Image (tube, rainbow, N blue to C red):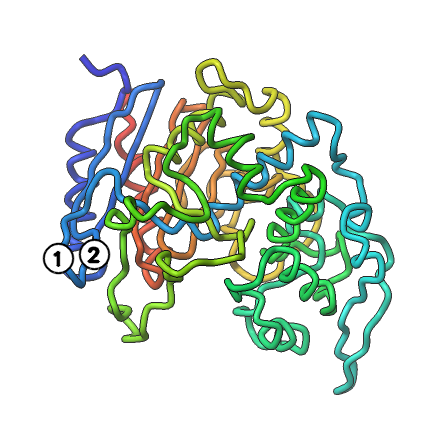
Amino acid sequence: MSTSGLNAAALARLSGALKRLIDANRLPGVVAMVSRRGEVGYFESMGRQDPQRGTPMRADAIFRLHSMTKPIVSVAAMMLVERGVLQLSDPVALYLPMFASARVGVERDGRFEMVPVKRPMTIQDLLRHTAGFTYEFYPVSAVRRRYVGARLNARERNNTEQIDSLASLPLMYEPGSVWEYSRATDVLGRVIEVAAGQSLGAHLQAAVFEPLAMSETGFALPGVLLSRVAEPFERDPDTGAASTLFDVREPAALESGGGGLLSTTSDYARFVQMLLNGGRLGDARLLGRKTVEAMTTDHLLAIPRAGDVLPPDHGFGLGFAVKTALGGGVEPGSVGSYGWSGSAGTAFFVDLQESLFAILMTQAPGQFDEVRELFRQLVYAAIDD
């Protein structure tokens, strides 16, 4: 008998809703998991893993995580904080000296000026996205045009080259003054490399993936696993634009802390269960319980938010969006629930009050907001007691 307290009929409705999107050719295929009270109550794969070839979706399909890489890198950074290697108050320039001369790009009366920062960005700023960076795909500005020209996504450049290029560009904001989702976690990944004395991929493998038995997660895949990679439609079903997800079969020097990892649903579930457990999975303790609490508490408070990436009634902790109130937005959940998503179509959330986590994996970049919201609504509708 199930002890998860999840309603079977409601979970069947979740499957039905996802299948309708697949049948309507809005999603190629999906793998989804819901766990409550330590029991996996739902684990389904449906649709096509590769819509071009008609390959059925496997439960162990491998997905581009995009920004669901960020929580893993944030955990790795906080593990170094717990070991006394990093401090949240450390200036980033202590590890990456090129940021000691950071300037903010300011547009005034049609002119572009470079203004010295009033205070240095810190490790905490990187973790909570208040370091002053931006992303090039936001609305056009003088700073973002420079981001575009710098080709910061170029996968043939390694992390050192990427961050050296980013450091040569102006900041979008004064550090600590504005929350804007940004390339800060790419910078954090490079900080980890300097502090740990090894590449980001090697460090994540030793510090996170091996202890959690995440054997099918990394920045690159052995050839034997390539047949399990989930693929998007060739063209977006709404816009007709060609898919732009990176080719996992092409060698890459870049190990993007902000979006480069590949993983399976089951592997990522081990990471998420560790968080729900307060930093521990089985005999492996990655973080102390109070550190996880600190990471999943709002660190923004009165800091203003730029853009609409962060949902209403949410703050941001150290790597996670955190629900701070009920009723101001459309997403259900408990105060203190947290999670994040990836623009290729992946999402997860954790609800400590309900002893619950849920993971959605697909490769549908144009539909991920719609599907993420639907998934969350129907998961919460399945809580029975």
> Where is residue 1 shown, x and y percent of the image?
18, 12
> Where is residue 174 shown, x and y percent of the image?
77, 60
Judge left or right: residue 292 versus residue 97: left
* Residue carrying label 2: 50
User: Is residue 209 depicted above or below 229 in this figure?
Assistant: above
The amino acid at mark 2 is: Asp
- What number of labels is visible? 2
Front-lying residue, 130 or 120: 120
The amino acid at mark 1 is: Gly
Residue at 62 percent across and 47 percent down: it is: 189
- Disc 2 is placed on an element classified as strand
Circles 2 and 1: CB distance less than 8 Å? Answer: yes
Judge left or right: residue 202 versus residue 359: right
Judge left or right: residue 201 versus residue 267: right
User: Is residue 158 depicted above or below 141 in this figure?
Assistant: above
Name which quarter of the figure residue 83 lies in.
top right
Front-lying residue, 338 or 219: 219
Residue at 28 percent across and 69 percent down: it is: 236
In the picture, the quarter occupied by the C terminus is top left
The outermost residue toward the bottom is 110
- Disc 1 is placed on an element classified as loop
* Residue carrying label 1: 54
Judge left or right: residue 219 versus residue 111: left
